[in-house]
Amino acid sequence: GLPGQGNISIDQKFQFASIIYAEVSGETRKEGVISDNSIPSFLLNGPLTAESMVKNNGNVHTDAEYTFQVWPLFSDEELCTNEEKPETSLVLPDTEKYHAQTCDKMPSFGIFKAKQTVSLFGETSIVERTVIVCPLWLLFVILFAIVALVIWIFMRVRKRKGSQKDDE
């Protein structure tokens, strides 16, 4: 709260919104672009989120359609999919729309394949990516093992050179 005012709280009682559609007099333009369609390649932990951005350059509204699929690299059994019932999102004329799809069923470690398909006005963008999920602690263990191996090899080479000089 504000000083001297005590505790002030604001409660939302209701929310109201409406979309108004209008007819275009004259020629309609159905133009749009899929300006971004991306899936990350590396995650420290789940969930995996695919993002996209579409822009409607026309003068009529449309629905953008999104599918997202994730499965283990060496399996065809999907962890997440909405292929049979794609998500749709209304895109009004002269607007851009951001959309994110998330797979919450990601294990904390592994290599996966992910595919996102975005469609707008008959244009389709498909992104397929291999995604590595590796926790931070495991990265440190791997890095430590590599550094220890390099030091061990260096010490062995140095010891051999030292013993060869003693033999001469």
Image: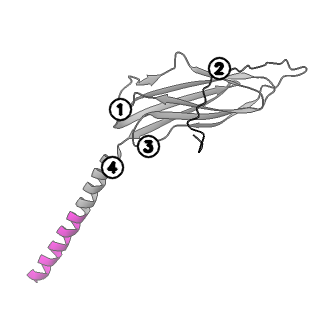
First-in-chain label (4 vs 3):
3
- Looking at the picture, which amino acid does disc 2 mark? Phe
- Looking at the picture, which amino acid does disc 4 mark? Leu
Magenta residues (range): 151-168
* Element at label 3: strand
Q: What residue sits right under mark 3 in the picture?
A: 42
**Residue 19 location, x and y as percent?**
74, 20
Distance from label 4 to label 2 (Cα)? 48 Å
Circle 1 crowding by C-alpha within 10 Å: few under 14, some 14–19, many from 20: some
First-in-chain label (1 vs 3):
3
Distance from label 2 to label 1 (Cα)? 39 Å
Residue 96 is covered by the magenta coloring:
no
Is residue 69 shown left or right of residue 168? right
Q: Say if 42 sits above or below 167 in the image.
A: above
Distance from label 2 to label 3 (Cα)? 41 Å
* Element at label 2: loop
Q: What residue sits right under mark 4 in the picture?
A: 139
**Residue 41 location, x and y as percent?**
46, 42
- Looking at the picture, which amino acid does disc 3 mark? Phe
**Residue 116 location, x and y as percent?**
54, 30
At a point 39% along the width and 24% down the height, the residue shown is: 76
**Residue 42 location, x and y as percent?**
43, 43
- Find residue 14 and name its label: 2
* Element at label 4: helix
Residue 157 is covered by the magenta coloring:
yes
Q: What residue sits right under mark 1 in the picture?
A: 107
